[in-house]
Structure formats: C-alpha cells, structure tokens
C-alpha cells in the first residue's frame, strides 16, 4: 500500500481501502485458507482476522503490496490455527470439567432460533436468484463455479448475487442490533 492505500490520503480511509481489498481478494483468500485449513468456517474466520489486522495497523504504516500482505498474514494465522488444533487434539479431555456435552441453556437456544428467523426473513426479501446463489454458496458451502454451473450463470454473476445477499443480511442485522 502506498500512503493513499494506507489511509493517509484525505479522500480515502483505511476502512475504505480494506473494503476494496476485501471485494477484490476475499474469495481467493478464503479459497487459499480453506485449502490449508480444510475448513470453510476456519478459512472465513482467519480471513476476517486478517482484515481486522489491516484495520488495526497504524495509519502511517506503508504496505507496498496489499495482496501479498493479505496472503502472508493469512498464511501466518493459518499456521497458528493449525498449531492450536494440534494442542487441543493432544490435550486430555475431562468430561466432568468440560461442558461441550451439555445441552445449551434455553436462553441460548431461543436466541439462536431468533437469529435463524431473522436470517430467514432477510433471505425471503431477496430476489429468487440472489437467495438461491447465497444459499448454495454460503449455507451449502458450494464453490462459486459449481453454483454458476447449476444456475447457468457466470461466476462473476454468482459472486454479485452472493455479495448482494451478504450486504442485505448485514444491513438487516445492523438495523436489528441498532434500532
């Protein structure tokens, strides 16, 4: 990133630059991480951590190659995630001390159901193609190419529909959290 990309220019903020990087590179970054971590959820989580790291950088920080920074930071975080998995796998499990087997308390269950209902309502507001592309990619975990083939669309159009659906769902969530 030069100074303008680092958020130093009066016309652009660091957040705006991170949004641009996200739009341009997120799909490739998540695919890269998914191959390393063998988990879509972990890949998406690590990718999010990378963007947060970018946002937390000092505004005076200069990054010459934002894409290289994204992928290097992602690779480092993926290694950390894999190490943590190995540590957890080696740690003895004490069923009396761990609550992983306990049924969620009713409040958590009710909150999860309400979140699911909110997502359903948000998805029902979307055009059918947008909703279908979102469900196939995000919920079913299918690759953009597979969704494009099934829907007889270009990958670019599938990305467009999924992006619109994500924006809509985020907007609905934000409105619900901040009335």
Image (cartoon, helix red, strand yellow):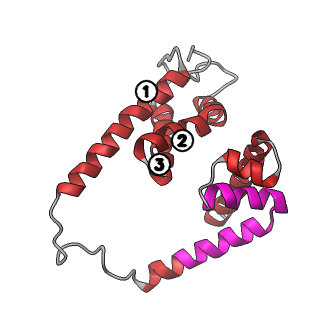
User: Would you place residue 124 above or below residue 151 in this image?
Assistant: below
Q: Which residues are magenta?
A: 112-139
Q: Which residue is painted at 40% across and 33% down in the image?
A: 75
For the residues labelled 3 and 2, the Cα–Cα distance comes to: 9 Å
Instruction: Say left or right for 88 vs 152.
Output: left
Q: Earlier in the sequence, mark 3 or mark 2?
A: 2
Q: Earlier in the sequence, mark 1 or mark 3?
A: 3
> Which residue in the protein does label 3 denote?
45
> Which residue in the protein does label 1 denote?
72
Instruction: Say left or right for 90 vs 15.
Output: left
User: Would you place residue 157 above or below residue 170 in this image?
Assistant: above
Q: Earlier in the sequence, mark 2 or mark 1?
A: 2
Asked if the residue under mark 3 is in contact with the one under mark 1, i.e. CB atoms within 8 Å, the reply is: no
> Which residue in the protein does label 2 denote?
30
Image quarter hosting the N terminus: top right
Q: Measured from the top left, where is residue 135 in percent x and y? A: 68, 61
Give the residue furthest to the bottom: 106
Asked if the residue under mark 1 is in contact with the one under mark 2, i.e. CB atoms within 8 Å, the reply is: no
Instruction: Say left or right for 81 vs 138.
Output: left
């Amino acid at each position: 990133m030069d100074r303008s990309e680092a958020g130093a220019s009066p016309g652009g903020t660091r957040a705006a630059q991170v949004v641009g990087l996200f739009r341009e590179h997120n799909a490739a970054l998540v695919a890269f991480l998914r191959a390393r971590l063998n988990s879509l959820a972990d890949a998406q989580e690590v990718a999010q951590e990378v963007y947060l790291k970018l946002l937390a950088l000092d505004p005076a920080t200069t990054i010459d190659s934002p894409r290289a920074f994204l992928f290097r930071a992602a690779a480092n975080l993926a290694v950390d995630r894999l190490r943590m998995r190995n540590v957890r796998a080696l740690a003895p499990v004490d069923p009396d001390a761990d609550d992983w087997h306990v049924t969620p308390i009713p409040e958590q269950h009710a909150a999860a159901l309400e979140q699911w209902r909110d997502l359903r309502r948000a998805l029902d507001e979307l055009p059918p193609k947008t909703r279908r592309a979102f469900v196939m990619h995000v919920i079913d975990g299918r690759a953009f190419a597979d969704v494009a083939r099934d829907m007889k669309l270009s990958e670019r159009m599938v990305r467009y529909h999924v992006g619109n659906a994500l924006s809509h769902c985020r907007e609905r969530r934000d409105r619900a959290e901040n009335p």
